[in-house]
Amino acid sequence: MSALPSIRQRLSQALVGISMVWGVAVSGVVWFAVHHEVGEVLDSTLQESAEILFGLLSFNAAQLPLQGGGALPAPLHDEHLVWQIVGTDQRVLLRSHRAPDLALVDRPTQGFASVSDAWRVFGMPFDANGQRLYVAQRVQARDKTRLEAAFLTCGSALLVGALCALWLRSRVSKELSPVADLSNAVARYDPVHGKSQLAEPRRSELVAVHRAITDLGTRLARQLSNERAFSAHAAHALRTPLAGMVAQLAVAQRELPAQAQPRLQRLREAADRLRRVVTALLTLFRTGNELSWQTVDVNALAHNLHFEKLGFVSTPALYIDADPDLLAAALLNVLDNALQHGARTVVISGHLDGDLSCLTLHDDGTGMPEAKRLQIQSALDAQCYEGEMGLGLMLADLVARAHGGCLRLHACMSGCKVALCFAKRPP
Amino acid sequence: MRLLLLEDDPILGEGLRDFLRADGHVVDWCARLGEALALRGEIYDAYLVDWQLPDGSGLDWVRALRQAGNDTPVLVMTARDLLSDRIRGLDTGADDYLVKPFDPEELSARIRAVRRRRSGSASPRLGFGDIELDLTARCAFVGGVRADLTAREWALTEALATRAGRIVSRSDLDGLVFGLDGEVASNALEVHISSIRRKLGKSLIETVRGLGYRITA
């Protein structure tokens, strides 16, 4: 079960993945938008700067030293924007002190222009004689500004995305915890013994599941209780008259004359067989219930079953972990089958088959044809008992299955070889 | 042995009563708890009790017996075959537990086994000088020679021998030998004791004047 994927883990991974893809996509869009918008802002700034400069310079145009091509006197400073006044012959008449000596553009330009990927220029007429004012900004500075803006914005978007992913992951864990709690509560829920009650669900979506499981548990407990009550009543109703019959027969055997004895003996044998069938039927009701595991002395158990007409040859100190009542019922039926098929001796042995502890009973009776054995084994494997076998084998198989094992019919030269295989006793 | 059989099923009750009587036991059969309670003062060698009775639980009756200090062997006979039921039955104070249906021969053997366990002797034979009693074969030997005792004589001898060293009152002996059913003549006990003394010797059964009879261990 632990190898199964976890809903919480899968959802968390999906959320982290979606958040990352979303963050990258949003960053791309933001990058494009910021890059574009910052360019426009810088262009607007360039244009407005040119217009302001135009106003300032044209106000004192008569005093401007427009012949030397030098810069206006100013303290040394860094310039993000440079400007030039260029004559009609494309000669620089006046410039800011960081502006180049040569005209920023090689021909008169109106409006925005980019020059050799080095400058972004805005040009406008300065006077009526054809002089022009150019204000420019380095492309490198503009790119750096756009890059910084885009990086900061994208970083912020990614950070918000990552924080959102963590928050969502935490929410998913929190929202799924009622499901995990219900799952754990169901695992501990034991309606049959009434020791536990299923804890109330903490989310409305789980109410229906909770109700369904509780109803199912209640029905199961009631059904088991009814079955147990029926089994107890049936046990009393069947066993007591049978005991009376056996007792009356025993008295009759003592009281009636010798010529009646063979008939009485046959009656007692029939009563014995009836007793085994009744025991088998009553055991059937219990095969689905909880097992009372014990270490059972198989030899003692086999001898206590009172098969006077059967001889047992068995491994000394043969023990197996099983429910003694169910094991007794299974042995009773397998041995009764052997008796019915003319067996006089049964060899009982034990061996391990992988994780299963097997108890093998090999009788010297008439056995069964190989085809029939395979047919019955196939029916046992598929649990299709009806019409394929008698009550004895069916019960023995149910008992073995109740112990986590199965019943096997082994091929043998003579007689019948049946193995009751049980799983290991749970810790 | 005097046995109290508590079984409500008439066929089983009658069958067991007749079988055990044929075995030489004195059997009082009650079909209801109320009848058994009315026999509170009677002495028995063992109780054979069904768990489920029409007017109550046989196991509760056993519990009450034990709480009252009665340590007479109890054998529970029931249709309940679960391990937990057997444990409960034995823990309540039963000495043995037999699941129905069972062979009456097995019941008889278990009664003897329970009785042996209670007497503290694993052997079914009791010896008193040159007299030996085989409780399983239900026969007596004097100097190795078998003595023929009637069923009543055997019941009387067994009742005293299994209580060797203790004085058994006449009324208790009446109950142990004749049970509740018999029409007993007033001197029947003395007649049987006299007969036993003839067959097994005068010294075996001692008369304790005014109190009863005793076999000295």
Image: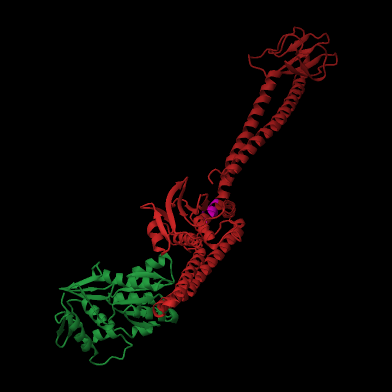
Chain colours: A red, B green
Place of residue B203 in the rendered image (x, y in percent of width and height, measured from the top left): 14, 80
Horizontal side, residue B38 vs residue A206: left or right: left
Residue A296, visible in the rendered structure = no
Q: Residue farthest to the top?
A: A68
Q: Report the quarter where the N terminus of chain B lies.
A: bottom left
Of the pair A315 and B77, the residue shown nearer to us: A315
Q: Residue farthest to the bottom?
A: B186
Judged by its main secondary structure, the magenta piece is helix
Of the pair A150 and B15, the residue shown nearer to us: B15
Kindly indicate the quadrant of the structure image that contains residue A71: top right
Residue at 61% x, 61% y is: A387
Place of residue A91 in the rendered image (x, y in percent of width and height, measured from the top left): 79, 8
**Magenta-highlighted residues:** A180-185
Residue at 85% x, 13% y is: A129
Kindly indicate the quadrant of the structure image that contains residue B2: bottom left
Of the pair A393 and A67, the residue shown nearer to us: A393
Is A184 inside the magenta-drawn segment?
Answer: yes
Horizontal side, residue A163 vs residue B81: left or right: right
Horizontal side, residue A14 vs residue A113: left or right: left
Place of residue A297 in the rendered image (x, y in percent of width and height, measured from the top left): 38, 56
